[in-house]
Image (cartoon, rainbow, N blue to C red):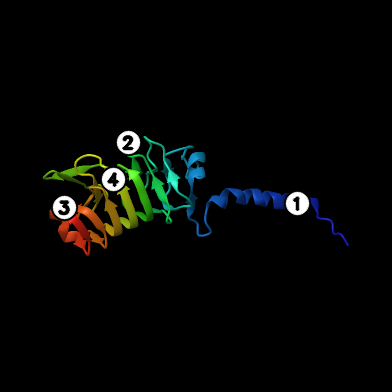
């Protein structure tokens, strides 16, 4: 026997489905998923316009669902607020060494705190991570004072040469764990910080007290 479906029930079901559709860009754990299509469409967070850069205006967790290929002259991801976690999820952010833009740039109010970037590759960028833009100078090497409490973990940074000392900077109370940086890279870690199980081409001598179990091909 065929049972007729009440018409009001169909309306409620359709309305409920439409309400759920905008949530499909989020994983079941509440993490916002980002891929190339999402980057081009925009709307990753309020105020994120179509195309690059992807603008993150809300604290929270974000996870790549595919590789990101960023056009020349554009940043990849711009973070405007603290307390943001970006999980590359084993994927790559692919840039163009002909421009000086950053794969991930922080532009929010100083200091940049509570940022975590992990688990993936950043390839072909002159500046892979720009998390603080104010610097003081010790000798000929500059280090930021407005990026602190940053966590970098399980990253491979394959960067082009940009300037004399292209550097991975982290501020005080930061953690760098299992990061491999090639192509004339050096690490400047403002103490107290922890840098462990990582490989760099050069480590600044005055910061070696922050380093544990790392490999540097030059000093």
Q: Earlier in the sequence, mark 2 or mark 3?
A: 2
Q: Earlier in the sequence, mark 1 or mark 2?
A: 1
| Callout 4 secondary element | loop
Please state which of the two labelled residues, at mark 3 or mark 1, is closer to the viewer: 3
Q: Which mark is residue 204?
A: 3
- Tell me the CA gap for discs 4 and 1: 52 Å
Q: Earlier in the sequence, mark 4 or mark 1?
A: 1
Q: Position of residue 168 (x, y in %)?
A: 25, 49
Q: Which mark is residue 110?
A: 4
How would you rate the neighbour count of disc 2 (Cα within 10 Å): few for under 14, some for 14-19, many for 20 or more?
A: some
Query: CB of mark 1 within 8 Å of CB of mark 2?
Result: no
Q: Which mark is residue 23?
A: none
Q: Position of residue 76 (x, y in %)?
A: 39, 42
Q: In the picture provided, is 10 more to the left or to the right than 144?
A: right
Pointer 1 residue: 10
Query: CB of mark 2 within 8 Å of CB of mark 4?
Result: no
């Amino acid at each position: 026997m065929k049972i007729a479906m009440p018409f009001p029930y169909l309306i409620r079901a359709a309305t409920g489905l439409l309400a759920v559709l905008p949530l499909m860009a989020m994983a079941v754990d509440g993490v916002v998923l980002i891929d190339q299509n999402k980057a081009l469409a925009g709307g990753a967070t309020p105020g994120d316009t179509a195309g690059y850069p992807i603008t993150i205006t809300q604290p929270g967790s974000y996870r790549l669902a595919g590789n990101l290929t960023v056009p020349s002259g554009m940043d990849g991801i711009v973070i405007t607020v603290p307390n943001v976690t970006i999980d590359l999820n084993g994927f790559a952010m692919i840039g163009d060494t002909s421009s000086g833009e950053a794969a991930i740039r922080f532009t929010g109010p100083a200091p940049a705190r509570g940022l975590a970037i992990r688990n993936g590759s950043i390839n072909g960028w002159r500046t892979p991570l720009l998390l603080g833009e104010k610097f003081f100078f010790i000798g000929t090497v500059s280090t930021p004072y407005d990026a602190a409490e940053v966590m970098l973990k399980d990253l491979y940074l394959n960067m082009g040469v940009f300037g004399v000392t292209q550097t991975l900077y982290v501020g005080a109370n930061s953690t760098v764990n299992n990061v491999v940086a090639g192509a004339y890279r050096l690490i400047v870690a403002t103490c107290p910080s922890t840098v462990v199980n990582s490989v760099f081409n050069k480590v600044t001598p005055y910061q070696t007290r922050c380093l544990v179990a790392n490999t540097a091909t030059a000093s």
